[in-house]
Amino acid sequence: MGFASLLNHPWPIALATLVIVFLLMARILGAFRTERVEANAGIALLCAMRWNEFSRLISEVLKDRGMQPAGTDRAPGQDGFDLLFARGTARYLVQCRNGANQVVTSAAVGQLHALAQVEGADGAIIVSCASADPEAVKLARERRIEILAGPELWAHVRTWVAHDQRVDAESVALAARRKRLLSATLVALTAAIAAFAIVSLTAPAPTASPPREPGAAAPVTPEPAVTPQPTPQSTPQPAAPALPDATLTDQQLASRRASAVMEVRDLTQVANAVWQTRSTLQISLQEMLADAELATLVDDICRSLLQYEELRFTRLQVDVPGGDADQPMQVRWRQCR
């Protein structure tokens, strides 16, 4: 049965329509990408927190990034900022906003920048459950102010929120995925039924073969000659890469982590590399790099880490020195997977 004859049969057409429409609708509805739904649900949970709980959560996130609290004797909100953190000799002002309507504006960025100059801080961070205006984001980049707002904030705090809150956000995302898959399935079934009906109504009727005369011998169809097929030679398949042994001891895991760090330190543009936490690798560069050079270096670092299965989700804290001596160090966050 050739391809042209398949077009006259309703079942293959209906099946192909079902699969194509389902995949298309699932992609349009975002059934396979529910991260945004989970992030929105998580942000709603953060907005429902009391401010003290929210600020403690942000403090834990900043500590995981290698920063330490400074000026713990000051009251939150004093002098126009809530928290004061330091990394080495550099100080950073932190504003924490967990109100759903506290959108980060250009005016807020400008005020915090002026406050950082008055306080002699090296930078500032605005943390907000609400979104940030595009103009505010652009201005923050120019003023060396980091903004963690909206769904992006959930990606930073997700591992630090309470387990039941994280499960609640994941449940909302799972329910949204099921609803979207159900919608895609219903649309695909409707399209398949319509295709089946159309092909059934428009397919040409089969033509009957002319009757044979009595006594006429049936035509004999010669059998096709059978040509011997060469026996395919088995070609060796490349062996699949072996996964790390699940029974590795803590000493063996520590040795693998140390080996990974040594490989990263051997890279030309890396000045030093140390483990800040079990999941965060701090990398200090020898000089300031362009974005393309930094991306190439990160690829080389990830190539070293991905040799070890347990390190493939490592977060990279890349400390990039400023172009001039008076410019503060910039921190870039990357992740291999």
Image (cartoon, grey):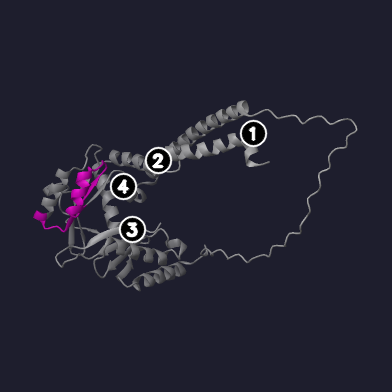
Instruction: Inspect the magenta stretch and tell me whether residue 144 lies in it.
Output: yes
Residue 327 percent across, percent down from the top left: 16, 63
Q: Nearer the viewer, mark 2 or mark 4?
A: 4
Amino acid type of disc 3? Answer: Arg
- According to the image, label 3 marks what residue? 334
**Which numbered disc, 3 or 2, marks the residue that appears first in the sequence?**
2
The residue stretch that appears in magenta:
117-145
Report the Cα–Cα distance between label 2 and label 4.
Answer: 18 Å
Determine whether the residue tagged by mark 2 lies in a helix, strand or loop: helix
Give the structural element (helix, strand or loop) at label 3.
strand
Disc 4 element: helix
Whether label 4 touches label 1, CB < 8 Å: no
Q: Nearer the viewer, mark 3 or mark 2?
A: 3
Q: Which residue is mark 2?
A: 168
- Can you identify the residue that label 4 sits on? 152
Q: Which class describes the residues within 10 Å of circle 1: few (<14), some (14-19), or many (20+)? A: some
Which sits in the foreground, 262 or 12?
12
- Closer to the chain start, of discs 2 and 1, is 1
Report whether 81 appears left or right of 257.
Answer: left
Q: Quadrant of the N terminus?
A: top right
For this view, does 322 lie left or right of residue 214? left
- Mark 3 closeness class: few <14, some 14–19, many ≥20 residues within 10 Å: some
